[in-house]
Image: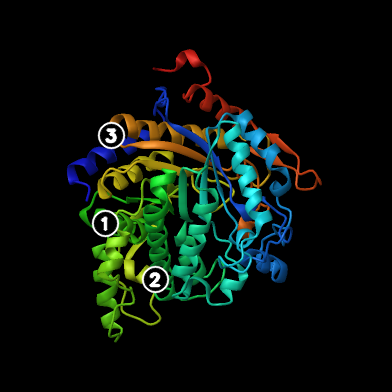
């Protein structure tokens, strides 16, 4: 846990960073620092039923229940990247990034979900994309699963099926076999918290099952075990010949204490453990955080249950999980403050909110965006990066997603420029002043795309996409020009002579 002395030092820094006199860090990033952009398969590819691809859960949802999407849209065509991947790579080349993070479509590679039937046209699409990237000096960073589960597997109870662990591990092995000679950076799952809390907890995401504090814990348990099994398969069968690195992408708010009281400091630590620690602690330390285990066990007992609602790992599973990441993949967009509260009374049905027993909120004076939850708080990333550094053995950290939205797709996206600049400045402060080893930064996203339940109403792209055009024309925004300069100079200001070597 972070020391009390270090905590107060950081609070002073954060308050200074929030102030109007915060000075942008003009020191160049290291020459080997990774700058990249990200996308995911369902959000950009289109070609939803072409060349042997089967239906995914998102294909099915948007076809059968379009009212669940804010604008009634779907990813049938999206950015049409399945047909325009060469144009996309040219766009990446022009931007000057050295890494491109994208995901594979499980149902495009394995139409029935299982390795007995590999869809060669689908595999060829990714082979061609990877080949084009490497020919242009861009390293692929491949996410194996980014939410689009084959419908055939969801109909077998999906992630909740104990067999999911083997289904996923088999799929990951196929991906390593097909693409691993040319891919050196892998992530197993993108934001499993959204899959589990969204899909099986608060029910704001596929498959929209409301089971807070119950099935959301089982979902996470299965995902973590699937991740560990895939990681160990890479260790045993592929690492020696392919020489890559494997991790997972975890999303987190930076949760800061609402005051300097001991109660609020403890509450913020509890919130972090129930959020990021829930997934990170098993992977980096071998088991769920102690605060989760003790609080959920005690509340489960009070509810009259014989066992905790939080599943337990076997000793063998703890060994497989412990150290099953070669770097820390972090998606971060915003933050919140955390205050202590009276412990919620024992009640049924349970919830993770009651299990945590703290209150978090975003101050009304923080900078707003077109999404209610996405407040701009760049100074808070320093707290989060230090927290990861202190809890998980000083890992190499790659910020695998960071970005901001608007609902107009404006070309003069000054807020996005400012957001990227200020978050990167605070990252540079953390590297330089705190010794945290951040080795890469990836913007979400290279271009506007299908934003899940928000459809096309929210734009995160550095490039505008004209979704009314059959050509899906891509046009750089002001933020693309800014980020191109950052990639070229490794510095956050426009004038190179102002940069500090």
Distance from Cα at disc 3 to Cα at disc 1: 22 Å
Q: Which mark is residue 217?
A: 2
In-image side of 491 versus 302 (left or right)? right
At a point 30% along the width and 55% down the height, the residue shown is 268
Residue 135, above or below 349: above
Residue 86 located left or right of residue 300 = right
Residue 406 spot, x, y in % from top left: 62, 45
Residue 101 appears in view: yes
- Across and down, in percent, residue 474 comes to 72, 38
Q: Can residue 79 be seen at all in this image of the molecule? A: no
The mark that comes first in sequence, 3 or 2, is: 2
Residue 254 position (above or below residue 263): above
Q: Which mark is residue 434?
A: 3
Mark in the foreground, 2 or 1: 1
Mark 2 and mark 1: span between their CA atoms? 18 Å
Q: Residues within 10 Å of mark 1 (few under 14, many from 20)?
A: some
200 vs 245: above or below:
below
Q: Secondary structure at mark 3?
A: helix
The residue closer to the viewer here, 97 or 109, is 109
Q: Earlier in the sequence, mark 2 or mark 1?
A: 2
Q: CA distance from mark 3 to mark 2?
A: 34 Å
Counting from the top left corner in percent of width and height, residue 126 is at: 62, 48
- Of residues 53 and 495, the one nearer the viewer is 53
The residue wearing badge 1 is: 285
Tell me which colouring the rendered structure shows.
rainbow
- Crowding at mark 3 (Cα within 10 Å: few <14, some 14-19, many 20+): some
């Amino acid at each position: 846990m972070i020391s009390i002395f270090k905590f107060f030092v950081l609070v002073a820094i954060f308050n200074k960073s929030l102030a109007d006199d915060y000075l942008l860090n003009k020191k160049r990033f290291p020459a080997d620092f990774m700058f990249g952009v990200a996308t995911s398969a369902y959000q950009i590819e289109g070609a939803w039923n072409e060349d042997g691809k089967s239906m995914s859960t998102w294909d099915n949802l948007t076809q059968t229940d379009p009212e669940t999407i804010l604008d009634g849209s779907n990813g049938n065509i999206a950015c049409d990247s399945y047909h325009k991947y060469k144009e996309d790579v040219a766009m990446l080349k022009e931007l000057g990034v050295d890494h491109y993070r994208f995901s594979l479509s499980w149902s495009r590679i394995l139409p029935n979900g299982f390795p007995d039937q590999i869809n060669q046209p689908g595999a060829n699409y990714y082979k061609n994309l990877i080949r084009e990237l490497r020919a242009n000096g861009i390293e692929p960073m491949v996410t194996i699963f980014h939410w689009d589960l084959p419908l055939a597997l969801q109909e077998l109870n999906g992630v909740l099926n104990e067999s999911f662990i083997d289904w996923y591990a088999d799929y990951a092995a196929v991906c390593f076999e097909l693409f691993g000679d040319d891919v050196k950076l892998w992530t197993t799952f993108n934001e499993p918290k959204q899959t589990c809390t969204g899909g099986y907890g608060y029910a704001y995401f596929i498959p929209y099952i409301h089971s807070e504090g119950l099935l959301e814990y089982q979902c996470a348990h299965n995902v973590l075990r699937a991740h560990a099994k895939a990681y160990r398969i890479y260790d045993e069968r592929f690492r020696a010949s392919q020489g890559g690195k494997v991790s997972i992408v975890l999303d987190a708010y930076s949760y800061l204490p609402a005051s300097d009281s001991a109660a609020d400091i403890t509450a913020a630590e509890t919130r972090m453990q129930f959020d990021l620690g829930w997934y990170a602690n098993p992977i980096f330390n071998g088991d769920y955080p102690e605060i989760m285990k003790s609080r959920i066990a005690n509340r489960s007992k009070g509810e009259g249950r014989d066992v905790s609602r939080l599943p337990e790992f076997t000793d063998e599973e703890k060994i497989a999980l412990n150290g099953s990441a070669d770097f820390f993949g972090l998606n971060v967009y915003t933050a919140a403050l955390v205050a202590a509260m009276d412990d919620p009374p024992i009640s049924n049905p349970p919830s993770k909110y009651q299990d945590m027993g703290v209150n978090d909120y975003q101050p009304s004076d923080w900078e707003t965006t077109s999404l209610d939850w996405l407040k701009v708080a760049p100074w808070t990333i320093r707290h989060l990066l230090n927290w990861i550094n202190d809890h998980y053995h000083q890992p190499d950290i790659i910020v695998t997603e960071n970005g901001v939205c608007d609902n107009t797709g404006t070309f003069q996206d000054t807020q996005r420029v400012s957001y990227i600049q200020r978050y990167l400045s605070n990252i540079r402060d953390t590297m330089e002043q705190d010794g945290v080893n951040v080795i890469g930064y990836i913007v979400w996203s290279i271009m506007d795309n299908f934003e899940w339940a928000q459809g096309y109403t929210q734009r995160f792209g550095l490039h505008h996409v004209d979704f009314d055009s059959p050509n899906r024309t891509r046009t750089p925004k002001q933020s693309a020009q800014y980020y191109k300069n950052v990639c070229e100079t490794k510095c956050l200001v426009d004038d190179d002579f102002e940069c500090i070597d």
